[in-house]
């Protein structure tokens, strides 16, 4: 082959590669790199083992997303013929009993049998500025974010997007309306709210960071008994809008990005939880 022929050969090959219809699917390795990079998951310390938790088929076109990789969600992903399942709460957590027994075995077994990839992103999907659960809560409630407060890096501080303060009961009804569920409210009914701190999921333990930041109210997902007293004695309004319900938006936002970037198709499957 002469030099000119080789040049043409390379050009032809490049043209063919460019014309190959790859939009609509992505390799597992490329998706893993993209998600880990986009969510900066290697840098963020977490009790979750973030990233690809269970490896499945090498090419991904259809994804299912949901909050928790419980057996019902895995079964639904199998039924939906998903190539990958992306969740906020995965199946591997640091410090957990590593034995493949009981419900843990059944979850892994179902994933392996269907050759589905399982990706889990916990804190990286809480704090991401664009698709994070906290950012999504801010958008859903039309809160104006100001800054991240506290040592955890998980609590946002901002304001309601109305000029006058609102009563705590009005705020609770507003949050309930926007999450489509009953919320728990611990507050003096007439407490006026302007500045708001928020953290999705099990954020009750971070109430102290909201108090230290001077917030009038703290909106989170799940609250424990001691947080009620802590809130009362600190004159801060505390609203629990559900661990599960406040963590649905992040995975859906992440999936929308994958649709735009790689042309994948996705389904959000909601396996409800009362908490
Ligand atoms: Zn959570």
Image (spheres, helix red, strand yellow):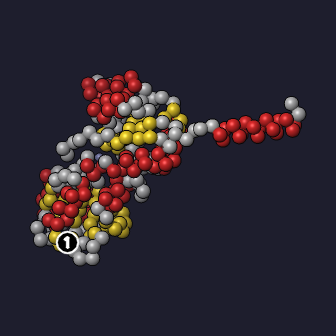
Residue at figure coordinates x 41%, y 33% from the top left = 82
Total marks placed: 1
Q: Residue furthest bottom?
A: 164
Left or right of 250, for residue 42? right
Residue 162 at least partly seen: yes
Q: What residue is at 51 percent from the left and 30 percent from the top?
A: 58
Q: In this view, does 181 lie to the left or right of 254?
A: left
Q: Which residue lies furthest to the left in this view?
A: 189
Q: Could you tell me residue 178's position as x and y percent?
A: 25, 57
Callout 1: helix, strand or loop?
A: strand
Residue 96 falls in which quadrant of the image? top left
Image-based side of 57 in relation to 191, left or right: right
Q: Write down the residue under mark 1.
A: 166
Looking at this view, is 178 or 27 the one in front? Answer: 178
Task: Decide which of 167, 256 is in the foreground and name it.
Answer: 256
In the image, what residue occupies the spot 76% across and 40% down? 11
Image quadrant where residue 15 sits? top right
Instruction: Quadrant for residue 241, please give it.
Output: bottom left
Q: In this view, does 172 lie above or below 270?
A: below
């Amino acid at each position: 082959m002469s030099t000119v022929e080789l040049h043409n050969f390379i050009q032809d090959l490049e043209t063919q590669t460019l014309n190959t219809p790859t939009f609509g699917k992505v390799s597992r390795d490329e998706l893993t790199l993209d998600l880990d990079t986009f969510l900066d998951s290697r840098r963020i310390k977490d009790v979750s083992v973030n990233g690809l938790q269970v490896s499945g088929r090498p090419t991904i076109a259809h994804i299912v997303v949901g909050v928790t990789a419980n057996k019902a969600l895995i079964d639904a992903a199998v039924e939906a013929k998903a190539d990958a399942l992306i969740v906020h709460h995965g199946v591997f957590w640091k410090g957990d009993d590593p034995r493949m027994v009981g419900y843990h075995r059944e979850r892994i077994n179902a994933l392996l049998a269907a050759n589905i990839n399982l990706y889990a992103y916990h804190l990286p999907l809480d704090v991401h500025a664009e698709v994070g659960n906290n950012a999504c809560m801010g958008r859903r409630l039309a809160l104006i974010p100001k800054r991240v407060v506290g040592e955890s890096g998980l609590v946002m501080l901002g304001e309601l997007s109305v000029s006058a303060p609102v009563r705590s009961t009005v705020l609770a009804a507003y949050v309930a309306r926007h999450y489509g569920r009953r919320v728990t409210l611990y507050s003096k009914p007439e407490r006026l709210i302007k500045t708001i701190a928020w953290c999705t999921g099990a954020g009750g333990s971070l109430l102290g960071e909201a108090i230290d930041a001077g917030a009038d109210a703290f909106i989170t997902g799940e609250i424990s008994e001691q947080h009620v007293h802590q809130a009362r004695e600190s004159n801060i309004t505390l609203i629990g809008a559900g661990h599960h319900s406040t963590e649905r938006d992040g995975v859906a936002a992440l999936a929308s990005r994958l649709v735009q970037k790689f042309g994948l198709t996705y389904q959000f499957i909601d396996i409800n939880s009362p908490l």
